[in-house]
Amino acid sequence: MEDGEASNNLSEKLPKRVLGDGCYPVGAWLNIYSKANVIGLLVEALKGTEDLEKLLHSQFGKLFYLPVARCCNSAKLVHALLSRQLVTTKKHEIWFLFGGQPLRYSIREFKEITGLNCNPEPDSTEEEEEVGKTGIWKDLFGRAKAMNVYDVLEMLKDPDLPRWKRLPLALIVLFDGVLFCNSKNLALTEKYVEMLSDLDRFMLYPWGRVSFNKTVSRFQAPKAITDAEKRENPVTRLRRQLKQKTSACYGFPLSLQLMALQSIPMLVSKIPQPDNLKTFFEDPEGCQNVITLLHLGDIHAVEFDPLMVVDDGENDQQNELRWGDEVEDAEVAFMQELMAEGYKFTPSDFAVAPAPIVDISDAEDEVTNEQEPEPSTRPKKKQKTHQTEKRKMQRKRGRGKNSSNLSEDETPESGQIKDLKRWIVLQNTLLLREIKTELDKRLGVYQEDEEDDDSSVRHNDGVHSEDGVHQKERDDEEGTSSYYGGDHYSPRDHAYLKTPEAPTMTPEPGQANSGTTRPPPYFVIPDEIPPSGLNE
């Protein structure tokens, strides 16, 4: 009992999980654009040249000495790590849990893996003034307007290629093929090509920090674009991203994979040729064939192995690797203190983060003004929001003809649904009054008075003030409603409660006549036109 209480108290001080232990998405697929085999192709194209020697002795040299057998992209491993994230306020580092043990991915680990210069970047305004248009693209590629990495590799194979072009072209291959991938076909980035006009400065630039920023931004919660997304909790957006069937990874995700294999030695034992430490320089063709590096079952087996060890490395960062805008997180600091003391964490030490869901239905009108996604972070195809996916699933369930499939979660326009609800309530009110009047007449207790005048039932908004409709609308605006019964369902509950059925409409006379039984003589068809959208 005491151990349980101690664990609960500890979980309040430690970072929270993005997803519950074992509650990880299944079937998600990451498209990793970076291709490590490009390094081997570059070695073959530059073999025996001074340009290759220059690269080997530059900040890019360590890339050529990466172990080939561990460099085939493992989307399963990368996604498994991302699904095991912890919620922190850190802007430039990510923490994971693997087997209950914390593991950090920061610029320190990135530098250790890649060997790139990870010092702070120069002022961005100065950079923009100095780069500009230099004409280097035309000097390298002539009139070609679009080039990709494979085009450049073919150029490097040409023995008649001018010598001065070889090193710039080789750098372009490393950039758009390995470190800064933006597209599936490895298209060249004009900005980086233009910076090659000053080759010495280019070779010393802190490209490690640039590549790390591009990589880690895709691992964190996606940027909020619409007003509705801006009102969401970032954890909600991250969870939704992790559950996407397909998503793209930019930058150099291989750095995270290599860090995990280095920090969790037991994972290496599950890959093909675990003892093969040949580098790209020694075996350029070692990564040309596509193989499955790790199966999901292998990852789970290691995670639950009692002998599994996570080497978290050193927690202190060098001064030159620090960030000026980094945010301190008390929960992370407490966790690092426990790590330094040698505390053995357990999965129960980390609770799941609560992610409050905002009232998306209140912002439906704002969603129509959705901006076009950035090409570098979102696919160009039409985006599927949480609401459209939910409507799609509900249509697949196949509701009956007489049951309404209009609810606050499903409706694309809040104004239209309010009109529809008001119209439905009004029709029911009128029908009930007609039924009561007819019954009173048959029983001989009917007394004609001013209340029989339909105009007294309708006010400016078309609803009697005593019908309870106004109170319901106020409840909707406040986010609390008893419209669906005693559960007090509100739009904010849509992520946790099953969407309740809307009240069934009173059948029209035509529908009632479909059977053999004739409708009673007091069934009156009101002369009311339904609002736009009901029969669409």
Image (cartoon, grey):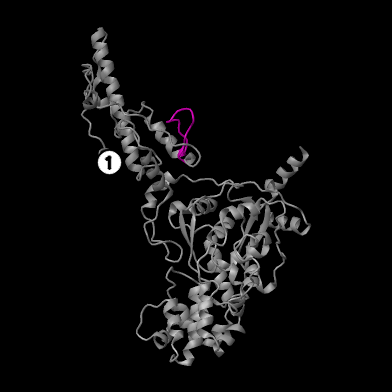
> In terms of secondary structure, what is the magenta stretch mainly?
loop
Q: Residue at x 44, y 46 (%)?
A: 360
Query: Quarter holding the C terminus?
Result: top left
Helix, strand or loop at mark 1:
loop
Q: Is residue 115 visible?
A: yes
Asked if 521 appears above or below 115 in the picture, the reply is above
Residue 411 percent location from the top left of the image: 36, 42
Q: Nearer the viewer, residue 112 or 287?
A: 287
**Apparent side of residue 49 relative to residue 315 in the rendered image (left or right):** left
Using the rendered view, name the quadrant where residue 206 is placed. Answer: bottom right
Mark 1 surroundings: few (<14), some (14-19) or many (≥20) residues within 10 A:
few
Using the rendered view, name the quadrant where residue 481 is placed. Answer: top left
For disc 1, the marked residue is: 533
Residue 482 percent location from the top left of the image: 45, 30
In this rendering, the count of numbered labels is: 1
**Apparent side of residue 441 relative to residue 359 in the rendered image (left or right):** left
Q: Nearer the viewer, residue 357 or 434?
A: 357
Magenta stretch, residue numbers: 478-491
Q: Nearer the viewer, residue 421 or 102?
A: 102
Q: Amino acid at mark 1?
A: Gly
Q: Residue at x 49, y 46 (%)?
A: 358
Q: Is residue 490 magenta?
A: yes
Asked if 410 appears above or below 52 in the picture, the reply is above
Query: Quarter holding the N terminus?
Result: top right
Residue 350 percent location from the top left of the image: 66, 48
Asked if 13 appears above or below 37 in the picture, the reply is above
Q: Is residue 519 magenta?
A: no
Residue 255 percent location from the top left of the image: 59, 68
